[in-house]
């Protein structure tokens, strides 16, 4: 009887492990595909789109995950194939430095103005 | 003095806004892919359409010549339009045309070839579209010109036309 319990428990653990692994993969596929731009249906992510391109892209992401690639390796692979535009996260370079630095600049200048003008700091 | 500084600040801000809008509003928001990539062709394996034989791209693109890799499908209307151009190019011995059949029904693909002619030396199949993604392709039709070192010289997104045919002939010289 004890043997039967052990076997049932082992089978249960095995299947729960598989289901858990599949769920983790699906979550990662969804996460990556939400950050990838559908290049033939602009304005949509690969996750949202049902175009042939997006469907194939989701398959590629799935295959890469199954091969053991990390999230950043997948982004790098896709950037290498399609250019930086494919991701929604622009890198810091000569074309995007203004985009990245302007909010920090506004934050500092704004903070300085508030500091100068507000009576609260003059107490 | 304070008023003057404020005024200068406002003028700079307005000029900045004007400059940003002046530069940006003329730019198109539509993404234009890079068609002169100069990238190395990714290695891939695919089955052939007619005899279901598995081939590796390293073996396929191993000869010392220019290759034209054409991504096509029988359901793609522009592919029919460019097929005549491919037939013309197939008469040129200095270029080898390889087809990649994209997400197609194999019976329809064979019918398409039997009806319109076969310009391809080999036809590979890409049933799920993943090989096309590995090649950096967007869809069908798409044509890649590959040199003897497996460098992608040029990409034609959409059907080939007279201009692209002239460019390809120029590359072959």
Image (spheres, coloured by chain):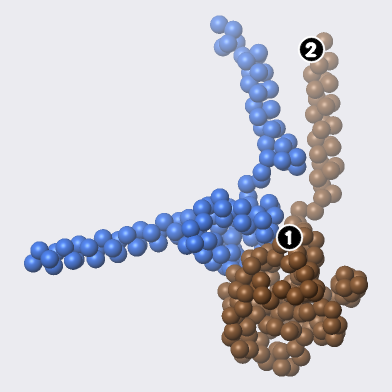
Above or below, A73 against A105 in this view is below
Q: Which mark is residue B2?
A: 2
Tint applied to chain A in the drawing: blue
Q: Residues within 10 Å of mark 2 (few under 14, many from 20)?
A: few
Residue at numbered disc 1: B39
State which quarter of the image contains the C terminus of chain A: top right
Query: Residue at 81% of width from left, 45% of height from top?
Result: B24
State which quarter of the image contains the N terminus of chain A: bottom left
Q: Are marks 1 and 2 on the same chain?
A: yes
Q: Toward which corner of the image does residue B109 lie, by quadrant?
A: bottom right
Above or below, B105 against B38 in this view is below
In the rendered view, does A118 fall on the left or right side of B35? Answer: left
Q: Nearer the viewer, residue A102 or B61?
A: B61
Query: Residue at 58% of width from left, 86% of height from top?
Result: B52
In the rendered view, does A18 fall on the left or right side of A96? Answer: left
Query: Is the C-beta separation of discs 1 and 2 under 8 Å?
Result: no
Tint applied to chain B in the drawing: brown
Above or below, A21 against B166 in this view is above
Residue B161 position, x and y percent, is 85, 75
The local secondary structure at tag 2 comes to helix
| View extreme (left): residue | A1
- Per the model, the C-alpha gap separating discs 1 and 2 is 57 Å
In the rendered view, does B148 fall on the left or right side of A47? Answer: right
User: Disc 1 is attached to a residue of which chain?
Assistant: B
Q: Is residue B54 visible?
A: yes
Q: Is residue B76 visible?
A: no
């Amino acid at each position: 009887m004890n043997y039967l319990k052990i076997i049932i428990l082992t089978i249960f653990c095995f299947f729960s492990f598989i289901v858990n692994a599949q769920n983790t993969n699906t979550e990662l596929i969804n996460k990556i595909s939400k950050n990838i731009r559908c290049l033939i249906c602009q304005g949509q992510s690969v996750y949202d789109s049902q175009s042939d391109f997006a469907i194939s892209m989701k398959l590629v992401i799935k295959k890469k995950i199954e091969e053991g690639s990390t999230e950043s390796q997948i982004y790098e692979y896709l950037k290498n194939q399609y250019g930086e535009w494919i991701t929604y996260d622009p890198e810091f370079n000569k074309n995007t430095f203004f985009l990245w630095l302007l909010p920090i600049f506004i934050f500092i200048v704004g903070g300085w103005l508030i500091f100068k003008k507000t009576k609260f700091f003059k107490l | 003095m304070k008023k003057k500084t404020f005024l200068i600040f406002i003028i700079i801000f307005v000029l900045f806004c004007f400059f940003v809008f002046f530069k940006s509003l003329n730019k198109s928001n539509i993404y234009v892919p890079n068609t002169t990539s100069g990238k190395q062709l990714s290695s891939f394996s695919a089955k052939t359409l007619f005899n279901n034989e598995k081939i590796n791209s390293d073996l396929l693109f191993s000869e010392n010549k220019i290759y034209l890799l054409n991504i096509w499908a029988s359901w793609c209307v522009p592919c029919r339009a460019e097929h005549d151009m491919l037939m013309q190019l197939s008469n040129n011995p200095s270029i080898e045309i390889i087809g990649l059949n994209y997400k197609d029904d194999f019976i329809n693909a064979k019918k398409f070839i039997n009806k319109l002619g076969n310009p391809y030396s080999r036809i590979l199949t890409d049933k799920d579209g993943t090989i096309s993604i590995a090649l950096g392709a967007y869809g069908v039709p798409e044509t890649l010109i590959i040199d003897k070192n497996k460098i992608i010289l040029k990409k034609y997104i959409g059907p080939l036309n007279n201009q692209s045919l002239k460019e390809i002939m120029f590359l072959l010289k």
